[in-house]
Amino acid sequence: MLNNLGAKAIVPVAVTVTGFALVCCILLYAGIKADMTRDAVAHSLTLADTVVKSTRFAMLRADRETLGNIVDSVGRQQEVDHLRIFDKKGLISFSSNRVETGRFVDKDAGGCLGCHNTPTPRATLEQMQQARRIVGTRGGDILAVTAPIYNEPSCSNASCHVHPEGQKILGILDIGFDLAPLQASLASLRWRMAIFTLMLLILTGIGVAALLRRSVITPIQRLIDFTGREINDSLNDEGHGLHDEIGTVADNHHRLRRRLHAALAELAVLSAKSGVIKD
Amino acid sequence: MTTLRAQTETKIRQLEARSLRGLWAMALFLLVSSAVYYGLERLFPLSPEIRSFLGPAPPLNLISLALVIYSFSAIVLILSRMTMGHPPGSGFAHVGYLTGFYIFFHLARASVENLWAVLAAGATILVLSAYHQRTFCAEAISEERETLARLELRERFGGEKREGGPE
């Protein structure tokens, strides 16, 4: 099956074009996915920071009711899976899921290990290290980010609600966002790229097959028919209608047949003559 | 004459074995890829000490760019060898290069999509290489068979000539 002219021309071209396009598409997709994930993390950290800043005044005044309302309102948004604020020991003070309030977070969980994997916990983390991927309460993939609530001069000097000056981190805000919209965009991108690669394969196959049929296979078939007619029947002076190199091959064959024909006729005349002489 | 016949037959057997080399390279690459997808971390766990000894991995974008350039060059090389009628190169060298890409992506903690890209690049290069190997060997085998047929004819007619020749 792979030994005919068509296969010999189509297989390497189709494999090359489709394979290379596929490699580029996959790498492009991986790059776009990494960029989109980085953007989502940056966006989530900005939102987490916004929540921290909007609760600052309530924290300074130790207004637990206002803080609880803010956490409830933000946590009720469709894209937000969870929102919790816990102190340095891991005791959850506020959570969008009321059941969690008053419990301790698991310090061995992925989000805590970023800072707590060394004997002395780290106070700062890089942007991507603040993010983690978890399975949410509703079963979907969740992008969770942790934003530390740092001690500020206004916190350590406040008259109502004092934290010691040496304490760097007062607490952590942990917020999780549903990754479904991002995953839907990536799935649509995947489909578009798959369709593009498939179309490229079909177009390459059809294009090469059409050109090959027009320029090579049909002229060769005509050459086979022409030479076959000349061998089986007699000399064909009607012409072959072939051009290019294949036309030259047909002309050469025709000339060769004419010479052979003439030589055979000459031989026939000679043998006839020798027969007459013998008689 | 018998020596020439034996030599041609040996050549045919060697070419037949050589035409399968591309398939062996593909099988080896599939084996390496399955090991990678099973989990390099599980097979060869790297401790933080070894990672710090090795130093930071190259950036992902740079490895991806290197993969694109490598795939492009390898495909062009195979196609030019096909066009010029040169003998095909060994597919096993490509398996080595592709394994190197798997290792680099693993060290850079790349996503699974990057591994798929190496698989696609490997499949393209090795299929082309195997196809080149197969067609090249098929043509060489057919030439050798023609030589064998000519030898057989010469032996037959030479023998007849000796038997029925003038005394």
Image (tube, coloured by chain):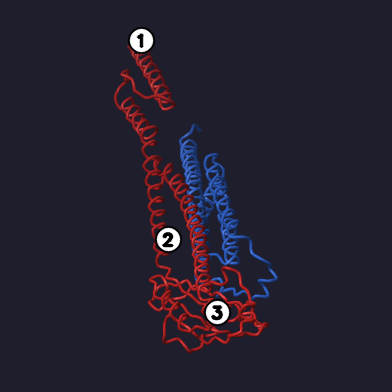
Chain colours: A red, B blue
**Left or right of residue A23: residue A187:** left
Quarter of the image for the N terminus of chain B: give it.
top right
Query: Alpha-carbon neighbours of circle 3 within 10 Å: few (<14), some, or many (≥20)?
Result: some
Q: Amino acid at mark 2?
A: Leu
Q: What is the distance, in whole Å, between disc 3 and disc 2 at their CAs?
A: 31 Å
Residue located 55% across and 55% down the image: B91
Is the residue at mark 1 from the same chain as the one at mark 3? yes
Single out the residue that lies furthest toward the front. Answer: A159
Q: First in sequence: mark 1 or mark 3? A: 3
Viewer-proximal residue, A13 or A118? A118
**Residue A186 circle label:** 2
Residue A84, placed above or below residue B163: below
- Dot 2: what SS? helix
Q: Quadrant of residue A129?
A: bottom right
Q: First in sequence: mark 3 or mark 2? A: 3
Q: Is label 3 in contact with label 2 (beta carbons under 8 Å)?
A: no
**Residue A172 circle label:** 3
**Chain to which mark 2 belongs:** A
**Chain to which mark 1 belongs:** A
Q: Amino acid at mark 1?
A: Ile
**Chain to which mark 3 belongs:** A
Viewer-proximal residue, A158 or A39? A158
Q: First in sequence: mark 1 or mark 2? A: 2
Single out the residue that lies furthest toward the left. Answer: A233
Q: Of tags 1 and 2, which is closer to the observer?
A: 2
Q: Of tags 3 and 2, which is closer to the observer?
A: 3
- Dot 1: what SS? helix
Question: Which residue matches tag 1?
Answer: A277
